[in-house]
Structures are given as C-alpha cells and as structure tokens.
Image (cartoon, coloured by chain):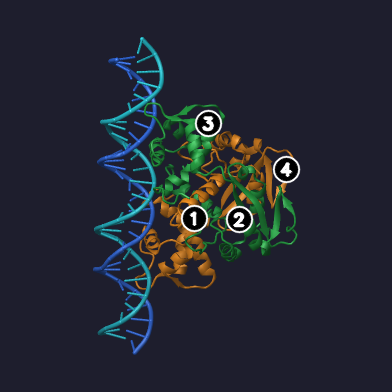
Chain colours: A orange, B green, C cyan, D blue
DNA sequence: GTGCTTATGTGAATTCGTTTACAATCAAGG
DNA sequence: CCTTGATTGTAAACGAATTCACATAAGCAC
C-alpha cells in the first residue's frame, strides 16, 4: 500500500510514532484541541518542525485555533496503520530478548511479539509471558505460517549475520537489530540498528565534549 | 577537558565508538593497515564519510597507503578517553534493567554499571551479576560517594521525570533514557533517548512506505 | 458584524551532513 | 631514482533537515 504517496522525509517519519503516542494520551485525558507549541513542549521537538511535519500530510489544523485532538488521532491511526496488528518474532531469548518478551511496551501499540526462537534446548518448548519459544530450526515453518515480516534480533553477535540471512530467506521485511554486527541484507529489507554500548559510549563522548547539550535525541 | 578543541560534528561523534570497536577487532586479528574502503565495508558507512570524519582530527592516514591500525587504535583510545573507566548507575531494575546488569556488553569498553537502584524492597540488598542493588532513597549518598555522573534510566515512565530530577540534583551529567518520557533537564545535562517501541513503530512505517531501504541506521 | 488575538502553513534562509571528484602524496617494485 | 598504482584529504556540489518569520485565516468576544 501507499508506496506512491508523496514521500515523507525520513526524519519526519521517525517522529510520527512519537506524535501519535502523545496524541493518544491527550485524547485519553479528554483534551479537545492542542497547539504546535503545546506539542512541542511535550515531545521536545521545535514547534516549527512539528507544523512542517504535519504539513506534509496536508492541512491538519486550523489557523488561530490549533489541531483538533480527535482528528489528529484518527489521522495518525490511519497513517500509522494502527488498526492492523503487526506480528513480530523475537530471535534470541537471552537477557535482552527475555526483557522484550516480558516488557509490556510491546503489548500497547499495534505490535505484538507472537513467537520467540532460541537454540537453547532448555528454553525451547517453554512459554514466556504467553509467548511460545521454539527452536531456531523451526523458524522457516513458523515464520511462514504466521506471516511474520518483522523480527527483533537479540542473538550473540557472532550469529547475527547468519540468522539474518535465514530471516531474509524466510521472507522477513524488517529487522530491529540489537547486536553490534552491521548486517548485510538485500535492500528490500529494512534494518534498524540499536547498538546499546555505542549509545552509552557516545553519550559519554558528548558529555565530555559538548558540555552544553543541543540536539541529538531530544 | 578538551572543550576547546574544534567541535566535531555530532553525526561524526556518534560514529566514533563504532569505528573504535572495529579498529579494536582489526588489531586483535593482527591486521597492520586498513583503508577507508575496508572500514566502509565493515561498518557500513560510506568511505568518503569515514575519511571526512577522520579528517576532523587531522591527517591520521597516509595517501596511497591507508591507516595504520595501531596508530588509529591509540588515537581513538585517547580521543574516546578509554583509559578511564566510567562508572554508571542503573536506576530501575525491572526486566530491561535486569538485562542490562546481566548483559556483558557493558563490561567491555570503559563503562561499568557499578550500582543499581530500585524501589522494590525484595530487590534491595541483593546483588545481580556482582552489582549491588540499593533502595532509591540511598541514591544521593551513593551517587556522590562513587562520583557517578552517568545513569541508565529504566524506571516506569510515570516516575521518569521525578527520578531524573533527583539525578540532576545529585550531580548527574548524562542520562541514557529508556523510558518513553521526554525528560526536562538543565541544558548542562545530556540526555539520549532510546525509545524501543518507537523504534519498532518507525521500522514498520519505513517498511511499508519505503520499500527499498536507504539511509537511517542503514 | 467588527475587530482582536491566536496559531497555522510555508517560502526563504540557514544549518548540518553526505557525496563527488580529484590533486596531492606515498609505498613499492623494478 | 623513476614510474606506477593506490588511497588519502578536502574543496565544492549537493541534499536533507531545521528554523525563521510572516501573511493568512479562523475563533472568539462584544
């Protein structure tokens, strides 16, 4: 769907889920209208950037008034395809993988970890927070059965590339990669890296060299 | 230190730990020299970008030859201040916090989680992978005693801002924030957000709207 | 209605980051 | 010591993202 809508800048696209979440909470608290200035304060993005982001989708607000919360909510739900649930596989049920399976943040939104895979026989066959853990050898069959096209990769980094190759073979379309490995995949597969030790290292570098903070992740 | 070195672009600064890690592994494998093209292949960053990044620090390589691995290693160790160990506190020992304490990735590098805090009395007083867990009420004393100026924040989001306020009061300089809350802190404190559910959401958005991947976290 | 206030939407300017493209330089081999 | 081949370092071009700044339009009060 929607590949031929005018392309939204990537930086904008990355902020959409952030907007959506805050709009949800506004709606839940009963607020009827909101200005770009209020949004800015809450999500810590410049108000002009917010207006520009919204404007890529047309005129969502009204001059002198702001944005109608219900309207925004409906709009973003549609745009972010929140009515369809996206099934996610978690590959590698170690410390980090376990946290993701248990952590409730994935049960909000429209994403759901429906299956975990691991090579450790003591984990295979168990259920964690309702999620069945299968052996990696069963990946092909289960991935195809459940039409899963997103995976969270939390295996030891030595296995990351080969597991990614398998995932690609089984038709994966997106990988959220928590391993330090830089994966090589066909360019039809989207990979986002979250490299925790690098995030920590770079935080420390910024602390030491940019004593007064600006930009970057807020 | 070094606040008055010429400022490195933020995008470059975020890549430095990545370079450092790969250079370490080159060194470990006994390689003597490396070109920007090889580095590019490994870390998946354009070779011109790598050369440009390096050039902010002066001429680290030799034309027609490449870079000397030992030299790069020494240079980056110094630049990234890898000889000093940075003590890190972990606040909020839930699923995710537990994973971080146990996960060995923090034991590499120069960073070390030396203490955890939680409000749950059943956790207080225990030790996880050698890290003592204290009650949040003891934060002030322990933070100051151990001269900790970086914290990983993995508390429920409702408490995030108030815990951050406390951390600021106790002299924190950097926070790696895993909660969805957008923290308000003085601009002398550096905050990096890692918002896991937003990362997943935005991956899915990109998959659906940018079928062929370019840029963004590769 | 009329006028005042407010806040959007966007053209233009700016800042930031990446990439191209190539002159300068060095190693290595004969 | 000269030539060849390789690879850096960077100027210039390009592209992406942010921010400024304001004309425009809507709500609201009276």
Q: Mark number for residue B26?
A: 3
Labels 4 and 3 in the same subunit: no
Q: Is residue A176 above or below residue A212?
A: above
What SS does tag 2 mark?
A: loop
| Disc 2/disc 4 C-alpha distance (Å) | 45 Å
Labels 3 and 1 in the same subunit: no
Nearest the camera: A131 or B55? B55
| Disc 2/disc 3 C-alpha distance (Å) | 34 Å
What residue is shown with label 1? Answer: A81
| Quarter of the rendering containing residue D14 | top left
Q: Earlier in the sequence, mark 1 or mark 4?
A: 1
Give the x, y percent position of residue D8. Answer: 38, 32
Give the x, y percent position of residue A143. Answer: 60, 41
Give the x, y percent position of residue A192. Answer: 50, 45
Task: Write the residue at 39% across / 42% down.
Answer: B56
Rate crowding at label 3 as few (under 14), some (14 to 19) or many (20 or more) other CA atoms within 10 Å: some
What residue is shown with label 2? Answer: B147
Labels 2 and 4 in the same subunit: no
């Amino acid at each position: 769907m929607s590949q031929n809508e005018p392309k939204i800048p990537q930086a904008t696209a990355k902020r959409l889920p952030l907007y959506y979440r805050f709009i949800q909470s506004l709606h839940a608290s009963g607020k009827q209208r909101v200005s770009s200035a209020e949004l800015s304060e809450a999500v810590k993005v410049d108000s002009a950037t917010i207006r520009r982001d919204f404007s890529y989708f047309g005129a969502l607000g009204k001059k002198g008034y702001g944005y109608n919360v219900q309207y925004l909510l409906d709009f973003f739900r549609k745009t972010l395809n929140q009515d369809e649930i996206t099934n996610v596989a978690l590959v590698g049920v170690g410390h980090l993988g376990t946290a993701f399976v248990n952590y409730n943040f994935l049960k909000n939104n429209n994403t759901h970890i429906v299956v975990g895979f691991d090579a450790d026989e003591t984990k295979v066959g168990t259920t964690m927070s309702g999620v069945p853990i299968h052996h990696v050898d069963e990946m092909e069959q289960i991935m195809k059965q459940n039409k899963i096209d997103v995976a969270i990769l939390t295996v030891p980094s030595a296995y990351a590339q080969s597991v990614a190759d398998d995932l690609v073979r089984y038709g994966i379309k997106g990988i959220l990669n928590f391993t330090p490995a830089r994966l090589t995949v066909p360019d039809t597969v989207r990979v986002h890296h979250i490299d925790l030790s690098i995030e920590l290292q770079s935080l420390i570098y910024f602390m030491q060299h940019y004593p007064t903070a600006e930009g970057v992740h807020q």
